[in-house]
Amino acid sequence: MTKVATLTDAVASIPDGSHVSLSGFAISRCAMAFAHEVIRQGIKGLTVSQCVTAMEADILVGGGGVERIISGGGSRGRFGQHHCINRGIEQGTLIAEEYSSLSMAFRFLAGALGLPFIPIRSLRGSDILKRLQEVAPSEVAMVDDPFTGDDWLVLKPVVPDVAVIQVQVADEEGNAWILGPRWTNEEQLKASKRGIIITERLVSTDMIRSEPERTVIPGFRVSHVVHLPYAAHPTAVYHAYDFDADHIKHYAQASRTPEGTREYLDRYVYGTRDHEEYLELIGGASHLDGLAADPALGY
Amino acid sequence: MTKVATLTDAVASIPDGSHVSLSGFAISRCAMAFAHEVIRQGIKGLTVSQCVTAMEADILVGGGGVERIISGGGSRGRFGQHHCINRGIEQGTLIAEEYSSLSMAFRFLAGALGLPFIPIRSLRGSDILKRLQEVAPSEVAMVDDPFTGDDWLVLKPVVPDVAVIQVQVADEEGNAWILGPRWTNEEQLKASKRGIIITERLVSTDMIRSEPERTVIPGFRVSHVVHLPYAAHPTAVYHAYDFDADHIKHYAQASRTPEGTREYLDRYVYGTRDHEEYLELIGGASHLDGLAADPALGY
Amino acid sequence: MTAEFEYTPLELMAAAGARELRDGEIVAVGLGLPVVVSFLAKRTHAPNITLLFELGVVDPEPVDTAVGLADPRIWYRAKILSSFVDMLGTVLHKGLVDVGFLGGLEIDAYGNLNTTLLGDPKGKYRHFTGSGGANDIASYARRTITIIRHEARKLNEAVAFVTSPGYLRGGEEREAAGLAGGPSRVITDKAIFDFDPESRRMRLVSIHPGITQEEVLANMNFQPIVPDAVPTTEPPTSEQVRLIREEIDPDGMYAG
Amino acid sequence: MTAEFEYTPLELMAAAGARELRDGEIVAVGLGLPVVVSFLAKRTHAPNITLLFELGVVDPEPVDTAVGLADPRIWYRAKILSSFVDMLGTVLHKGLVDVGFLGGLEIDAYGNLNTTLLGDPKGKYRHFTGSGGANDIASYARRTITIIRHEARKLNEAVAFVTSPGYLRGGEEREAAGLAGGPSRVITDKAIFDFDPESRRMRLVSIHPGITQEEVLANMNFQPIVPDAVPTTEPPTSEQVRLIREEIDPDGMYAG
């Protein structure tokens, strides 16, 4: 059964107030075209979760549609901090449930496995835990290990309404491969009630059947498959294209202020009707060709 | 650092009384040559764990070296029951901690993740749980879900002393791929204190680096790599060779009685000095050629 | 409608099982007749069902008959080859399996299944397969379908060992034990049963063509609930029989 | 032994860090100087260390300088590309990481690290990166090594926010919180510190060549424990400097 859809339709399936789990990690495999379309459609009140915060989450916050972010923290590495997220936290307009990488990974894993709670050794003794006990007291608790009597911190599973996963290869049913490290994308997708797959390449189900060990996204969990090359620009997609350093620097500079963010959104998001127009605006085919990955290096 | 070793040396690293987790599932990827060598070396008092019982566990029990088996049950499918295991249970010479597939999978997963316990919805209301509460009362307990107040069964992690994993492809450090379904082999290996890898093909680390998404066994967990083609005979190794139906039937018939088992062991295990002699005895190269997998079908 | 062609009891059972599957459902399949049932549904009214095999196999297209789940013949052209944790953890334990197929040494009046032992577990007994994924599937697939031969020794008031819980001793006992879902159908070579919604005791739904109610009850070691009028089981269609014989199970290994 | 060649403070720090790693250890690495430290150890006395990057990367052999862990340049020729659950779950949480590298906005007298915010979290403050894997690594790597610039604003009696716990307020507080391992070394561009085994307060171990004890203490907002005699930090060897400049970090991005 084909689930191939336009980005417009896939985004339109997400009601205001949904919990959306995003596939990006800093500057890699970020669902940028998805975030742009969410902003264009004016979807509001979102909860966003991801293991390590990334550029699509930052621009979604900048676009004003995010009420709460659940993550293990993060930055853009040498491209600096996520200004929109940090500004939202500092100004109190964004509720941040901040964990660590492993505690997010375990929360997604617990969601994926249908566990009611998962024990973890992280967070103990830290101000992260103290703050969570204020911001999200219903998500953390202590349990006695019935086998040893030790006390253990346990975390509640995360069960997002929808996971939006940017991949390299998918078929029309949504069976998909992720090349390179998967960070927590497999757990996020399997924890969620459904998945939206944004894929660089759409392949036949016969191709999926030819290397079934690689299928980390099961099609039966997926509601929409959007075939959209360069949908992660300006972030990197391993074995497809490199990150666009100049554009990331441009965004980094613009997003330092609310005004700059607004100008960026006006130009690149509201000023383009869709992803195709966005790609034309940032330089079109000749610019994108310069980002294409070297097949041996993968970037 | 090379960990390539002879089967003799790898087996000799296992003291009496060890807990050994085995990779087989019914009639696929069973560590048969390993089991034979354990019997030849007369290692005793073993605890054996595996998700679904398989032929190498049955012959190890038949050889008299196994004191306890921890598994989710199992058979050889159309090739019948595991007679040695069942006889041991019926006669009280083998302690059986019997779970279900998922409860074994979760126990290995908990061991792999360093979890103190893992909640599960299986086993409740069954006689499996009642019997475990008699045979292994320290391995199961009830915990209140701190988030909902519901009571949950929790299982203790399994942490074997060594996992013995029969694979298709490994390098000299023990980085390895498993083609086909992995059942619980990845979790077993990662739950264990160390791993012994028996591989059909020994490849360069450059080859491992060429498809790093496939490395499910990390070399840094492995103590010995044994390069031994046809080490799973008479069971199947996907994309290497098919199971040997006639030999499995022969074993199935022999193992129906203690005498038949003894005769089988005398001929095929004690009667051969090593795996090479065993392969000659069962028909040598010409017989094995007939089992070679079709590259398209994988069997 | 009358069937004017020959069919075997197993073909009838396969067709009856296939009718229980709705399009789009996720089905946990074991080897044997459930494979035929599932592929029959997939090739007729339910092309979008997803078939899971517990060891880590999704939607294969086998071309050769397998001897068990561990036989690579059943993995051929799968969409996913993964693991128990993936299948039974992220799908079944997550609550996504709609239908699970079960079988066993014996089933009892409340749908409890035994695949572990026969005889007295405190004294002399024979040990068999144990659970595998059966207990897991029985514990929380939304509904389970058991396919079992209609012999008195296999249909008892209470099983010797509850490997896979049905409704336990009936009423609300299953829910009290913390279990979801439950048995929905038992398909034998003589009849089809469901479970009374109150008592949760097995109840006769239909009797296969050519079988009498006396034959059904005489070959059971317990008395199921018998409604006043029990219809005849709908026979397979000629197209269903053709699919089984020519495409799904040409060697007659499962449904022969 | 005197070093008769030029080296930068970062090269000295890299060499000092490399000396802390023993062959065969499993090391959790972040980006930046720890990458240089780890590859330097691997190419000299510790060829069998295993390098883990939290997102799911083991033992890469990068040929280009990366801008962060999310940059595919750092994944090049890895032996494993997997996931956070695999790296931080099955290795770190399992208790197998010997050494973790950490950095931060500030560290305090008991080795607690802040990567989350500066200012007053109850009032006006600036938010930064948060934890990532740092809290996890700090919670149960067997030992951690922090590399940080030697500036008073980064070396405080207590941090504004404990992102990654060290010895908390000292003594047995860390163990009481249920944490294993703990900080073993702090390497700055002026000195190396460890922690007093009783009080768990930071203690001066050695001062880098050309730096005075006064410079070390004047640029700290707390008083570390200072033993009577503090040796001079061993400088890098010419071979270490050559490896860093020619092979490990030819662009000088990390240790330039």
Image (tube, coloured by chain):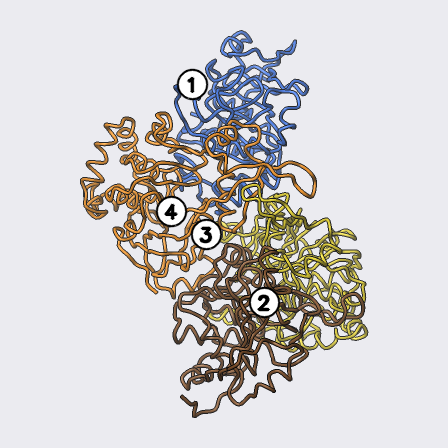
Chain colours: A orange, B yellow, C brown, D blue
Measure the C-alpha gap from mark 1 to mark 3.
39 Å
In the picture of the structure, the residue carrying the numbered disc 1 is D119
For residue A190, the mark is 3
For the residue carrying disc 4, how many other residues have a C-alpha within 10 Å: few (<14), some (14-19), or many (20+)? many
Label located before the other in sequence (3 or 4): 3
Q: Are marks 4 and 2 on the same chain?
A: no
Chain letter of the residue carrying label 3? A
Q: Which image quarter: residue D32?
A: top left
Q: Marks 1 and 4: in contact by CB < 8 Å?
A: no
Measure the C-alpha gap from mark 3 to mark 4.
22 Å
In the picture of the structure, the residue carrying the numbered disc 2 is C199
Confirm whether residue B123 shows in the render.
yes
Q: Marks 2 and 4: in contact by CB < 8 Å?
A: no
Q: Nearer the viewer, residue C68 or C116?
A: C116
Q: Marks 4 and 3: in contact by CB < 8 Å?
A: no
The amino acid type found where label 4 is placed reads Tyr
Chain letter of the residue carrying label 2? C
In the picture of the structure, the residue carrying the numbered disc 4 is A238
User: Which image quadrant: the N terminus of chain B?
Assistant: top right
Q: Are marks 4 and 1 on the same chain?
A: no
